[in-house]
Image (cartoon, helix red, strand yellow):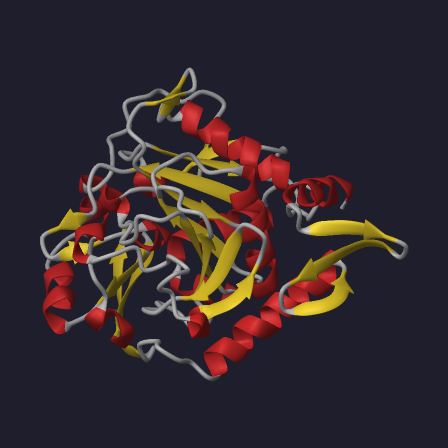
Amino acid sequence: MKSMSNSLLKAGILSIGAIGLFYFSKHSRQPQTLEQLIATINMKIQKSYSNPQEMEPFKILKKEIQEEQGVGFHILMISSLKKKPITVEDQPKDVFDEKILPKTQIIYQLPHHNLIFNKYPVHQLHTLVVSKQFVPQNDPLSLEDFEATYLVMSALDGFAYFNSHKECGASQPRRHFQVLPKKALESAPVLQILEKFMLFNTVTQHQLARLKIYKKINHLIVIFAFEISGDQIQTLYSNYKKLLRELEIITDDQVRDFKYNLIITKRYMIIIERSSSNFGNININAIGYTGCLTVKDEDTLHFIRERSIVDILEHLAQNNLKNWNNVIEI
């Protein structure tokens, strides 16, 4: 855990004292190891959701499965989405600004990020990792973003996702990752394809891959031979930049068109290049590309039923125009 500790030291999260490496937070004067910090974050998230304030009630009102190309896509009608603003333009202000953000919405504070419960959750324990200082959502991610997100992924034993632009499903202008618990994988059939592949196949470290079901979409996956540990956050960050270059979203350190969805677990990372977020009356962010479409009402559910989900996802993404070498298909 040495390199993770070194990077956290530079970020001001960790300090060295007589007893060794430890963490101090606004919430406690007691020092904590990294493992204790992760456990503390888990406890704070659990507590926040056990007594929610200013949060729309979360309930799955209806669940349907639509089979396409051997994949059972999930369609979930979720109660909390009925009042969610759809786009950045629908927001009258930066709701994550600490000057106006209700303190009851903050779960935990790290040096550069606030952990906030999602006011419109798509799953229980849905947590946001939000930059304290304003950073535009469509700027390149930083190592500190990955460090903070890794802590929450570890606390929830789940996966994280990021929508880089309003045309990718972002509804807030300030930098924020979103993290869901492991149980959310049960409604993510496309991620289950990857999980199953890794269970029955041996992969080389940093193996590049693509999904057959998304063959027309400009996307790329990097698979890690082993689960990323706390001392390998730099590996996540380096591979994020590598995927952006491989997909030619960034060329020669210049941003071409920074519209993408990012999905991260401790075993793999996926980037999908996007073209638009809206198809008819539905708005799709990174969750849609996990194989789960979330809707707020019967009209939207009916709209999807009459169409191919794969066609919708292809329509909202950039076309793949590249012949890939040394990339496996899953």
Q: Of 147 and 239, which appears nearest the observer?
A: 147
Is residue 274 visible to us here? yes
Residue 108, image x, y percentages:
55, 65
Query: Is 43 rendered above or below residue 66?
Result: below
Quadrant of the image containing the C terminus: top left
**Which residue is depicted at the point 56% across and 43% down?**
144
**Which residue is depicted at the point 85% across and 53% down?**
17
Q: Of 225 and 149, which appears nearest the observer?
A: 149
The answer to which image quadrant residue 92 occupies is: bottom left
Q: Of 297 and 208, which appears nearest the observer?
A: 297
The answer to whether residue 133 is left or right of residue 30 is left
Is residue 207 visible to us here? no
| Residue located farthest toward the bottom when viewing the structure as drawn | 51
Residue 287, image x, y percentages:
34, 55
The answer to which image quadrant residue 262 occupies is: top left
The answer to whether residue 264 is left or right of residue 227 is left
**Which residue is depicted at the point 23% across and 66% down?**
84
The answer to which image quadrant residue 85 occupies is: bottom left
Report how many numbered discs are placed on residues in the image: 0
